[in-house]
Image (cartoon, rainbow, N blue to C red):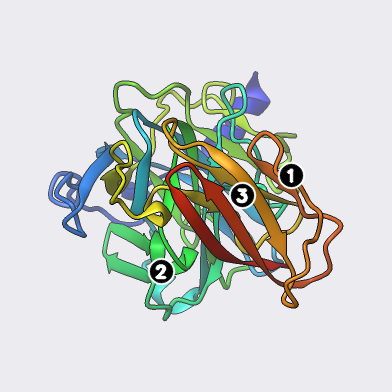
Amino acid sequence: MKKITFLAAALVGFAGFAQSFDAVSNAVSSTPATGEAVLWDQPREETGGIVSCINNVPSGVFSADDFVLAESSRIDMIRVSGFNNNANLETDITGYSLYIYEDAFGLPSGDPSSAGDGVFEAIELDPADPALTADYTVGDVSFTVDIGMVNGGDLVLPAGNYWVVAAPSIDIPDFDGGNRWNWSQGTEQAGGEASAVLIDVDDNFGGGFTTWTDFATLGIAWDGLVFTVEGEPQEIIGVNDNLASVVSIFPNPTQDRLNVSVPSDVKINNAVLYDVLGKDTGLKLSNGTINTSSLARGVYMLNIQTDRGTLTEKIVKQ
């Protein structure tokens, strides 16, 4: 028990240790940044936070929190908020990563140590990437990712439970509390299914938490993180609606599998993956997934025939 208590003290950062900030004036607002609907919003609570970043080894310690979509929705933007006590992040940041995972029995279905597990993965975005907006306000370092820009098109997710992981990469050798980025303590929105979790894949803190571990096990009394998800619920598709706006194909680029998600009122009649010469690869869609592990790297075309029309999307195999 003592080991867990000491580890929690190492993992959890409080802004008062190195700098103070106004937790009220800097709290994440539910006012949309993009003009779209707020699908999920967890504002700041108190001044606590927990490590979630990548150092220059490189090695990462990642935190995650869940959100719920009551209906099929297009995800336009995700904003997270945290703090960097030494105010050096704007100079030392080298990249930024954001992941969305499906839920697997109350935990994320994957983690950043294994690329390709997420339904959305923005890996090591350049700080100057137009899809990334960073606000280095003292006491409140927030990051906003334009999901559609990174995804190369709309990301539409069916109703369900999902997890967000956010982590800037910083030119630091370790996870010193002053230099690292801490994801701020948030108020868990009603309807959230699980406590926030942390994973220390390389066991940097020596606690053995190399798989997703809930905050209570870490000895942390709170269980929510600050983030906002914006987008638009997708209504039942009509005859004249754009099929591409409600069909979600992910991850793209892909490595081992390609997922195809459609609203409940859309029936897929056939799905064929062609190579650049127009030859059928022979791979089949099964339970919403195409196993792409046998494909050579390159560009392919996925043709999906539904009872509401036909959609063709370019697929990149990594």
Above or below for 35 versus 125: above
Camera-side residue: 312 or 209? Answer: 312
- In what quadrant of the picture does the N terminus appear? top right
**Residue assigned mark 3:** 61
- The reply to whether callout 1 and callout 2 are in contact (CB within 8 Å) is no
Kindly state the secondary structure of the residue where label 2 is placed.
helix
- In the image: residue 52, left or right of residue 77: right
Q: Amino acid at mark 2?
A: Met
Q: Indicate the position of residue 74 as horizontal and vertical percent values.
A: 35, 48
Q: Indicate the position of residue 299 as horizontal and vertical percent values.
A: 69, 73
- In the image: residue 211, left or right of residue 105: right
Alpha carbon separation for disc pair 3 and 1: 9 Å
Residue in view at x 29 percent, y 21 percent = 190
Residue in view at x 36 percent, y 64 percent = 146
Q: Mark 1, residues whose alpha carbon is within 10 Å: few (<14), some, or many (≥20)?
A: some
Q: Indicate the position of residue 278 as horizontal and vertical percent values.
A: 72, 72
Q: Amino acid at mark 3?
A: Val
Q: Quadrant of residue 303?
A: bottom right
**Residue assigned mark 2:** 149
User: Can residue 80 be spotted in the picture?
Assistant: no
Camera-side residue: 225 or 257? Answer: 257
- The reply to whether callout 2 and callout 3 are in contact (CB within 8 Å) is no
Q: Mark 2, residues whose alpha carbon is within 10 Å: few (<14), some, or many (≥20)?
A: some
Alpha carbon separation for disc pair 2 and 3: 26 Å
**Residue assigned mark 1:** 203
